[in-house]
């Protein structure tokens, strides 16, 4: 059951977006509305969703709650998309939950997407494990995302940047409109740093949402910087302070809704937070860090952290073809890398040699995943940064035979 269910899932393919919420709503109804068994927090945004979710999940668990958290994408295995009480679920449990989703799909006579099936499986797993609260990360956009079939008690919008233009539009305003569809009238909406009600309110076309000023994570950034100095944070980078600020404000909203969340417990959770692929030292390799910066904003944040550390790494860069590669290259050039090696994977979604050379320059070498793995196993003078895409990092880890742990 397990392997066949996961294989059936992988056969659906990961990419694209389907307009309409009929399928996820029908699936959830058919499996008995597992999402009604616990409250959920939904996280939307261009960047920072996973890190904000990681902070929230670990903090809530440290406060004594049994937490379910679903995120995407995964690096090696779809089990990484479902985290319950501090650990990824097993392939056996994932197979069982997917089996229920496939059976419901067959009874309904519909064809669901990969993401719709994964979200259904995650919500079923949360019900089976009797979680106290679920943290649910939106996938692509918000309006037609499967997670928009839920009714979150709090919605989070981490930030809005240019990404997935084919599906969401090519302006921050159009992208924000899609993501704001996850908000719910009369329920808290936490805005990440840099987002204000003055900019957001006119963009709401899905349904009206209240904007008390106390909901703004941006209002807490200076305060958080002073507090952070006396606590350990598990994720590196100045941009993680922004994600932490957003998580803190979300926790404040949950406190106002009646959740007992002792302050010291929350900070213990922040200190324990790990998130592979986000300024993460790859275990077993010599001075190799991985960061899945997958768009210009992500590249800007990663580059800022590298500059703050005062290092000039050897850069190993692989990216998908639909990204703004030139803008990402421009951000990474600011770190004055010691060297740049370009990598093209075997998947057709990867940028080809011509696209990589156009962004970085014809003189740079383009190698495959196997050669990149061979070189990363060898000692090197100075640190190395693997970046450009989480999918690239996942493929490289698979080639290296390294499995991430949290």
Image (tube, rainbow, N blue to C red):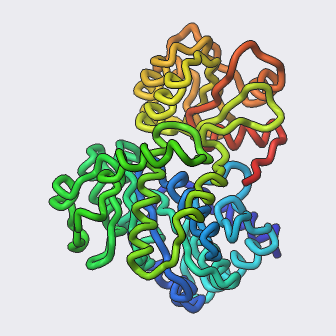
Residue 43 place in picture, x, y as percent: 45, 62
Residue at the front extreme of this rendering? 230
Residue 354 shown left or right of residue 344 in the figure: left
Quarter holding residue 343 = top right
The quadrant of the image that shows the N terminus is bottom right
User: Which residue occupies 55% across, 57% down?
Assistant: 55
Q: Is residue 25 above or below residue 243?
A: below
Residue 310 shown left or right of residue 274 in the figure: left
Residue 192 place in picture, x, y as percent: 36, 53
Residue 242 place in picture, x, y as percent: 42, 46
Residue 366 place in picture, x, y as percent: 64, 19
Residue 160 versus residue 106: which sits nearer the camera? 160
User: Which residue occupies 53% across, 23% down?
Assistant: 356
Q: Is residue 268 above or below residue 285?
A: below
Residue 341 shown left or right of residue 238 in the figure: right
The quadrant of the image that shows the C terminus is bottom right
Residue at the top extreme of this rendering? 363
Q: Is residue 281 above or below residue 257?
A: above
Q: How many marks?
A: 0
Do we see residue 341 in this rendering?
yes
User: Which residue occupies 65% across, 35% down?
Assistant: 290
User: Which residue occupies 66% across, 50% down?
Assistant: 274
């Amino acid at each position: 059951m397990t392997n066949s269910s996961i294989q059936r899932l992988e056969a659906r393919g990961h990419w694209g977006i389907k307009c309409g919420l009929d399928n996820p709503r029908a699936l959830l109804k058919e499996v008995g509305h597992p999402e009604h068994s616990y409250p959920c927090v939904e996280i939307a945004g261009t960047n920072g969703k996973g890190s904000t979710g990681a902070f929230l999940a670990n903090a809530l668990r440290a406060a004594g709650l049994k937490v379910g958290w679903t995120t995407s994408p995964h690096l090696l295995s779809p089990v990484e998309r479902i985290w319950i009480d501090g650990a990824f679920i097993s392939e056996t449990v994932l197979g069982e939950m997917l089996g229920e989703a496939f059976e419901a799909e067959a009874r309904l006579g519909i064809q669901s997407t990969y993401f719709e099936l994964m979200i259904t499986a995650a919500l079923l797993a949360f019900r089976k494990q009797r979680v106290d609260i679920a943290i649910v990360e939106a996938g692509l956009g918000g309006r037609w995302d499967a997670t928009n079939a839920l009714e979150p008690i709090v919605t989070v919008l981490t930030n809005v940047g240019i990404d997935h233009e084919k599906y969401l539009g090519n302006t921050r305003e159009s992208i924000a409109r899609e993501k704001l569809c996850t908000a719910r009238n009369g329920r808290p909406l936490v805005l990440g740093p840099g987002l204000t009600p003055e900019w957001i309110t006119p963009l709401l076309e899905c349904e009206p949402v209240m904007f008390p000023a106390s909901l703004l994570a941006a209002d807490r950034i200076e305060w958080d910087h002073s507090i952070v100095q006396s606590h350990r944070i598990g994720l590196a980078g100045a941009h993680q302070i922004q994600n932490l600020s957003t998580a803190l404000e979300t926790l404040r909203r949950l406190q106002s809704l009646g959740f007992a969340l002792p302050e010291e417990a929350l900070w213990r959770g922040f200190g324990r937070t790990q998130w592979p692929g986000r300024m993460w030292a790859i275990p077993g390799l010599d001075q190799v860090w991985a960061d899945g910066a997958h768009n210009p904003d992500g590249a800007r944040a990663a580059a800022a952290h590298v500059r703050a550390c005062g290092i000039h790494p050897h850069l190993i860069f692989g990216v998908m073809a639909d990204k703004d590669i030139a803008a990402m290259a421009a951000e990474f050039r600011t770190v004055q890398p010691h060297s740049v090696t370009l990598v093209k994977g075997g998947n057709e979604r990867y940028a080809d040699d011509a696209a990589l050379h156009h962004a970085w320059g014809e003189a740079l070498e383009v190698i495959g995943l196997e050669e990149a793995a061979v070189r990363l196993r060898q000692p090197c003078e100075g640190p190395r940064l693997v970046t450009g895409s989480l999918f690239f990092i996942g493929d490289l880890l698979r080639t290296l035979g390294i499995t991430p742990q949290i």
